[in-house]
Amino acid sequence: MKHFKVLPLAAIIATSMASFASTAETDVASLEKRIQELETKLETNYFDDQQPAVLSSETEVPAGIVFSGYARYGAHYQGSDAKRVGSFGSLNANATGRLGNEGNGGEFQFAKAFQSDGGAIWDIVLMMEHWADPSWASDPDIGLKKFYAGATNLFESQKDLYIWAGRDFHQRPQTDLNDYFWMSHDGQGAGFYNLDLGGVKLNVGAVGEIDGGNVSDSGRYAVTTKLHGFNLGETFDLSLYANYGWDSKQVDSREKIEAYQVAAELGFLGQKLIVRYADNAKDSVLYSYAVAEDQNALLVQFDGGQSLTDRAGIQYSVGYQSLDVSGSESRVNYHAIVRPTYQWDDVHSTWFEAGYNVVDYKDFDAQNSSWKATVSQNMAIGGETWSRPMLRFYATVGNQDNEFTGVNEDPTDLDTLTVGAMFEAWW
């Protein structure tokens, strides 16, 4: 997870900072009204989707530099065979559940916004990242994740069209409990968001894969599209995706591969249903390591949450993903995660998370499975599930029974018993 953030909350905070600076000489009533509006947005509009922050023509331009980001750091003490729980070959990311089962790292972003005399709003954004978890980055050194510029309110007929160019997070929708970016196309390129087609809006990007630690493209490119804002009443929200990736003539050291993805994302009453099909790919059509000939993947995942009482709630995630590949590692991944929560007051909460994950190999008489249970006592800045910063003290037990760990490799049966303390924050 990680953010500008990259999400509605950072935009809200940045806007509120600008508002506080510009209203220093206004009356108290106006300030109180602004605070109330901010609190309402924090309580009702926030969700963690890891998307880029997109300016609109209504964005209030903050004064100075806006510092935002996401981070989690802490100690994770291992008392048994394995430090974390997961099935070998899992397709659905941290499919046994992320609570008490994830690594350290963070992203730290600086943004500057400008407004021209004609009303156009510009921003320049720089983000550095530091991830010690190999699932996020193979090199734990600090690296450049973003450096781009963008502008909105450039055209009278398309006031909210936002045009960007540079290096950015790009099309990375995420589900929370399994920390899964079910699409990911971070890279360097250009594109636009929110082209109004009369009732729906279109996002289009053209990006190149970053060549390791270099500043140039690797020669692999992708065109990504998202059609969103379908009017399905007050209950349903539908988004459609279509992406295409290919290797240019620059690539001569490997087989050139074309790949595509299509997906639908349906949101309703706090729930989300995702269906995605990929050909010659799985999560990405951009990254060289993620594409292969004669490969296809189908994902169906349902995520959501419900309030049970004023203090108790529950989140859940169930998913199915199949991967058919040439060779012998075709498999199907099933997972189920449930997280009941209880809020004692505006600071203290208790969470319990249980997860079960199965990877079933088609060409072997082998099934890998894992389960875990985590209890977490939390202290946060507010009484909402998504209130951050948060201090978290947790204990995890679990097991991973891997009948297949690779051709000619031995099976493993590993227990997990850990205790830990960490902070998590986005700002």
Image (tube, grey):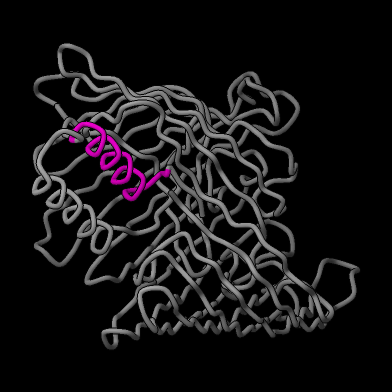
Residue at the spot x=72%, y=51% of the render? 132
| Image-based side of 384 in relation to 281, left or right | left
Residue at the spot x=15%, y=46% of the render? 31
Residue at the spot x=36%, y=80% of the render? 345
Residue at the spot x=79%, y=80% of the render? 403
- Please state which of residues 371 and 227 is positioned toward the viewer in this rendering: 371
- Please state which of residues 148 and 231 is positioned toward the viewer in this rendering: 148
- Residue 133, percent from left and from top: 70, 54
As for residue 264 lying within the magenta part, the answer is no
Q: Range of the magenta residues?
A: 5-23
Main secondary structure found in the magenta portion: helix
The reply to whether residue 164 is visible in this rendering is no
- Please state which of residues 59 and 301 is positioned toward the viewer in this rendering: 59
- Residue 42, percent from left and from top: 28, 58
The reply to whether residue 209 is visible in this rendering is yes
| Image-based side of 215 in relation to 364, left or right | left
- Residue 135, percent from left and from top: 67, 54
- Residue 318, percent from left and from top: 45, 77
In this rendering, the answer to whether 377 lies above or below 242 is: below
Q: Quadrant of residue 377?
A: bottom right
Task: Work out which residue is located at the far top of the displayed protein and give it.
Answer: 117
